[in-house]
Image (spheres, helix red, strand yellow):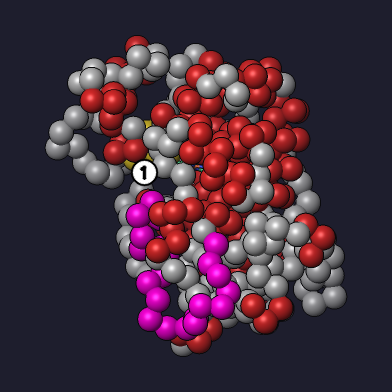
């Protein structure tokens, strides 16, 4: 099952750079300069969701990476920097997310030129896709500006890995001002979308150097994944769904899957295996409304991590490049 063919051109990520201070953002930021913004965004997101459903998970993941990979505002800027899209885990970002943002931006520029940041567009588009897939609708505060630089070196340090431990995940999330509850709720985004085999191959064939599979994978899921993802010589483009039954439906099945040892990544399954996070996995698995509420709050907090405001940022004309880079 090959869903995406990836191309890696120099591109954005690092458009957003989202502020620890919530009240700096506001719901009515564009009420005068671009009152029709929400409708403009949703005209693109709803069409894309119908025609290219993978745009949903791709854009939500892009928003997560953009918020986590922060770039200091005073380190030069302009040309010559390695754009973050080409680095490490960002290489597996599906192109459909970038394309969705580009398409919205192009439309918005025709109606409200040079006022709406790519960072705000990404935040609104991610919200739309969550809702279109069946998830909660929440209000998005706006007023972010786009980063003037992006630094490849920031990517690795600021993103979790598929085999990060709960200690590592908690350290990373709390360093961004996010809580244990945010970690568990936001990981619920893995109720939709796909992962490449290489992200979980170790669990299938050689768990922690034992040359055996991870004991915490349901045997039937293990068999199915081993068939899709051969140990050696497999196609590197092959992906598997996070939620086998409903990969495009944003529901709370993710947590039920974890309780049934059907988590895809080690970092997913770890949320159920660790005493600190298990109670929340169980609570969200039982109560969809509780998950939706926690997820919406988590997305708002994540969208406010170290945003750029005023002169520290810019409104990019084209989301894939800083204005100075021409
Ligand atoms: C908690 C730590 C997290 C880890 C270790 C993690 C790791 C990953 C990995 C390895 C993939 C598969 C990449 C690939 O091979 O294509 C993935 C996909 C995805 N992640 Fe996460 N992630 C985490 C948190 C989040 C958060 C907070 C969100 C959003 C709120 C998110 C949204 C997604 C989505 C939607 C996909 C599917 C993308 C697609 O199908 O194109 N993840 N993640």
Q: Is residue 298 magenta?
A: no
Residue drawn where x is 37% and y is 72% of the image: 82
Please tell me whether mark 1 sits on a helix, a strand or a loop. Answer: loop
Q: Residues within 10 Å of mark 1 (few under 14, many from 20)?
A: few
Residue drawn where x is 49% and y is 82% of the image: 76
231 lies left or right of 176: left
Q: Position of residue 267 (x, y in %)?
A: 45, 32
In the displayed structure, 125 sits above or below 252; it is below
Q: Residue 178 is drawn in which quadrant?
A: top right
Q: Residue 26 is drawn in which quadrant?
A: bottom right
In the displayed structure, 114 sits above or below 183; it is below
Q: Position of residue 212 (x, y in %)?
A: 24, 17
The stretch in magenta equals 70-90
Q: Toward the viewer: 269 or 225?
A: 269
Residue drawn where x is 32% and y is 52% of the image: 5
52 lies left or right of 118: left
Question: Disc 1 marks which residue?
Answer: 3
29 lies left or right of 176: right
Looking at the image, can residue 253 be seen?
A: no
Q: Quadrant of the N terminus?
A: top left
Q: Toward the viewer: 156 or 236?
A: 156
Q: Toward the viewer: 134 or 216?
A: 216
Residue drawn where x is 63% and y is 76% of the image: 313
Disc 1 residue lies near ligand 1 with CB under 8 A? yes
């Amino acid at each position: 099952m090959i869903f995406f063919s990836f191309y890696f051109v120099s591109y954005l990520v690092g458009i957003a750079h989202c502020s620890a201070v919530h009240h700096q953002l506001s719901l009515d930021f564009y009420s005068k300069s671009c009152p029709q913004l929400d409708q403009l965004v949703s005209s693109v997101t709803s069409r894309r969701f119908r025609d290219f459903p993978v745009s949903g998970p791709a854009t939500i993941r892009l928003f997560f990476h953009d918020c986590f990979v922060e770039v200091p505002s005073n380190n030069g800027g302009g040309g010559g920097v390695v754009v973050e899209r080409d680095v490490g885990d960002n290489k597996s970002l599906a192109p459909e997310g970038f394309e969705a943002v580009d398409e919205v931006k192009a439309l918005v520029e025709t109606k409200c030129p040079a006022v709406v940041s790519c960072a705000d567009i990404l935040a609104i588009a991610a919200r739309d896709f969550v809702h279109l897939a069946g998830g909660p609708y929440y209000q998005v505060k706006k007023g972010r500006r786009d980063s003037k630089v992006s630094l490849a070196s920031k990517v690795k340090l600021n993103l979790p890995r598929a085999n990060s431990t709960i200690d590592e995940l908690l350290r990373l999330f709390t360093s961004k001002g996010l809580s244990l509850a945010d970690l568990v709720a936001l990981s619920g985004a893995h109720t939709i979308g796909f992962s490449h085999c290489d992200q979980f191959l170790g669990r299938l064939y050689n768990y922690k150097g034992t040359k055996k599979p991870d004991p915490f994978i349901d045997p039937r899921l293990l068999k199915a994944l081993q068939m899709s993802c051969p140990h050696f010589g497999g196609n590197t483009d092959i992906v598997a769904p996070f939620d086998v039954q409903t990969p495009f439906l944003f529901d709370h099945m993710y947590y039920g899957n974890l309780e049934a040892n059907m988590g895809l990544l080690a970092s997913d399954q770890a949320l159920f295996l660790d005493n600190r996070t298990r109670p929340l996995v169980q609570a969200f698995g039982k109560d969809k409304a509780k998950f939706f509420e926690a997820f919406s709050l988590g997305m708002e907090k994540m969208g406010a991590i170290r945003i750029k405001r005023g002169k520290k940022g810019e409104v990019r004309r084209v989301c894939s490049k800083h204005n100075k880079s021409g």
